[in-house]
């Protein structure tokens, strides 16, 4: 893959900045044309995209790529295109009584040049979803995909270059040094998706330019089984949500809280649910590999530490297969009641490893969730509305799915984003459009304004009017 240099990086940015200055408010048709080209890029090259991602992972289910990336990204583009005219429309805003007959309006104005830094785990969706919002809002876009998916990143750069002028959108490839230079550019907005630790560095680099940032990070997203849940259905849905992309999902359930005394039953049911989804693992094209040897070693080290500290470790290997040294497929692992201080319970797992912890009552479950950083997602399974309401009100998370996993991320009519250590800001649908726009308030004075009555020289008239204003403001 041909990487750009730092001089070229700055040149690309200046090209886009000049182009935006020449067209600072693209009309509806221009924006819809850009979205149409983005959609055609996906539609015309679906097979090549799936193959590139499969090659980068060393085994990534093409069905997962289609449903979790291509479908979600297409839906987002179509939703934006269908609603763009309404999002762009100037809105009337109510005017307070003392200022009548003046009026208020709100304009959605493009920001300029937007930077997007996307991760490796969903390399298409997490690149093009924010790009969709930025283009819909009328901006120019520079995209820096992950160096851990070199085949896909190279393909995306070529496809974008074929359909977009460099001053509209371009893809920057390269390693960590280029990434550092990229986030240090004076973008008008920067969106980063990745780990919390790197997100802090990105925020610091952007702060030097006072660049506003949207950070989509991660953390330890809990799943809670309430005693009222349909256990078989809950286990099946949790197993699918956890093992999609082999757990390499920012909103994957990171640990499971179950009622006291039920962990053995839940473990057995999880084993059966996994076997139904993946009767074999090692050479099963439906089961995705870990992205790199380094990530695989990291996961194995966390499991080893849990075992060494006394936690019960249950490997789910339905066909009792052997996994060779060259394979990056990792069998699902359950870790029962691990200690709070081990890495498995302090770090985001990002793989097919699921700690299972018991709780005595809902208050203890809530306290466990609130004892750590605020998670990107929370999953609650149950049929007791009072408990559901309490969990939702007493925990803070980026988003929630009730009685399933992951699906809140695919709702274009809802914002997606983190809170606290799991991120800041939101996008998707109209929230993405607004993230990459300046909501410019406009006050339009009437020719019949009464404001001159409050001008100097001050006297009794001012005093009487001010006395009235105290009750009208």
Image: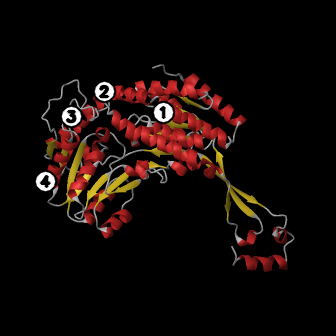
Q: Is residue 139 visible?
A: no
Frontmost residue, 309 versus 91: 91
Secondary structure of the residue carrying tag 4 is helix
The numbered mark, 2 or 1, whose residue comes first in the sequence reads 1
Q: Position of residue 104 (x, y in %)?
A: 71, 61
Residue drawn where x is 39% and y is 26% of the image: 52
Considering only order in the chain, which callout, 4 or 2, is on the residue closer to the N terminus?
2
Separation of residues labelled 2 and 3 (CA atoms): 14 Å
* Dot placed on the residue nearer the N-terminal end, 3 or 1: 1
Q: Residues within 10 Å of mark 2 (few under 14, many from 20)?
A: some
* Local crowd size for mark 3, using a 10 Å CA cut-off: few (<14), some (14–19), many (≥20): many
CA distance for labels 2 and 1 = 24 Å
| Residue denoted by label 1 | 43
Residue farthest toward the top in the current orientation of the protein: 2
Tell which residue pokes out farthest to the right in this image.
457
Label 3 vs label 1: CA separation? 30 Å
Dot 2 or dot 3, earlier in sequence: 2
Cβ–Cβ under 8 Å for marks 2 and 4: no
Where does label 2 land, which residue? Answer: 58
Closer mark to the observer between disc 3 and disc 4: 3
Task: Pick the quarter of the image with the C terminus.
Answer: bottom right
Label 4 and label 1: CA atoms lie apart by 46 Å
Q: Are marks 2 and 3 in contact (CB under 8 Å)?
A: no
Residue for badge 4? 264
Q: Give the crowd class for mark 4: few <14, some 14-19, many >=20 residues within 10 Å.
A: few
Q: Secondary structure at mark 1?
A: helix
Q: Which residue is mark 3?
A: 281
Q: Secondary structure at mark 3?
A: loop
Residue occupying image coordinates x 51% and y 31%: 41
In the rendered image, the residue lying farthest to the front is: 44
* Residue 149: mark: none
């Amino acid at each position: 893959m041909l990487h750009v240099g730092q001089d070229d990086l700055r040149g690309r940015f200046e090209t886009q900045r000049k182009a935006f200055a020449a067209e600072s408010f693209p009309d509806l048709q221009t924006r819809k044309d850009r979205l149409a080209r983005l959609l055609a890029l996906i539609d015309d090259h679906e097979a090549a995209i799936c193959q590139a991602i499969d090659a980068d992972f060393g085994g990534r289910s093409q069905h997962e790529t289609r449903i979790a990336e291509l479908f979600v990204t297409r839906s987002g583009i179509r939703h934006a295109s269908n609603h763009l005219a309404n999002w762009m429309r100037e809105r009337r805003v109510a005017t307070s009584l003392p200022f009548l007959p003046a009026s208020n309006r709100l304009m959605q104005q493009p920001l300029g040049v937007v930077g997007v830094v996307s991760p490796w785990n969903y390399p298409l969706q997490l690149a093009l979803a924010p790009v969709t919002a930025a283009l819909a809002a009328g901006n120019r876009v520079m995209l820096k995909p992950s160096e851990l998916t070199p085949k896909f990143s190279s393909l995306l750069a070529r496809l974008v270059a074929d359909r977009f002028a460099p001053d509209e959108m371009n893809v920057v490839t390269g390693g960590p040094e280029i990434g550092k230079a990229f986030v240090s550019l004076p973008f008008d907005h920067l969106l980063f998706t990745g780990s919390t630790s790197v997100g802090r560095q990105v925020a610091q680099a952007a702060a030097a330019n006072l660049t506003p940032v949207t950070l989509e990070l991660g953390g330890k997203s809990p799943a809670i089984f309430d005693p009222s849940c349909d256990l078989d259905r809950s286990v099946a849905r949790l197993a699918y949500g956890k093992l999609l992309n082999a757990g390499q999902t920012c909103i994957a359930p990171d640990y499971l809280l179950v009622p006291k005394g039920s962990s053995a039953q839940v473990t057995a049911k999880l084993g059966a649910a996994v076997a139904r989804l993946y009767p074999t693992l090692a050479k099963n094209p439906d089961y995705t590999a870990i992205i790199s040897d380094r990530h695989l070693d990291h996961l194995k080290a966390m499991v080893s530490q849990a075992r060494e500290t006394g936690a019960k470790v249950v490997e789910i290997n339905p066909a009792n297969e052997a996994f060779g040294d060259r394979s990056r497929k990792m069998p699902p692992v359950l870790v029962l009641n691990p200690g709070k201080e081990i890495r498995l319970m302090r770090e985001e797992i990002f793989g097919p490893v699921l700690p299972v912890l018991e709780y005595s009552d809902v208050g203890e479950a809530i306290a466990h969730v609130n004892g750590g950083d605020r998670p990107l997602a929370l999953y609650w399974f149950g049929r007791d509305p009072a408990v559901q309401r309490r969990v939702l009100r007493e925990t803070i998370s980026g988003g929630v799915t009730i009685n399933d996993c992951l699906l809140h991320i695919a709702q274009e009519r809802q914002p997606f984003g983190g809170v606290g250590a799991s991120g800041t800001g939101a996008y998707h649908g109209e929230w993405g459009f607004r993230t990459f726009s300046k909501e410019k308030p406009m006050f339009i004075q009437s020719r019949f304004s009464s404001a001159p009555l409050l001008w100097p020289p001050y006297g009794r008239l001012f005093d009487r009017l001010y006395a009235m204003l105290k009750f009208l403001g």
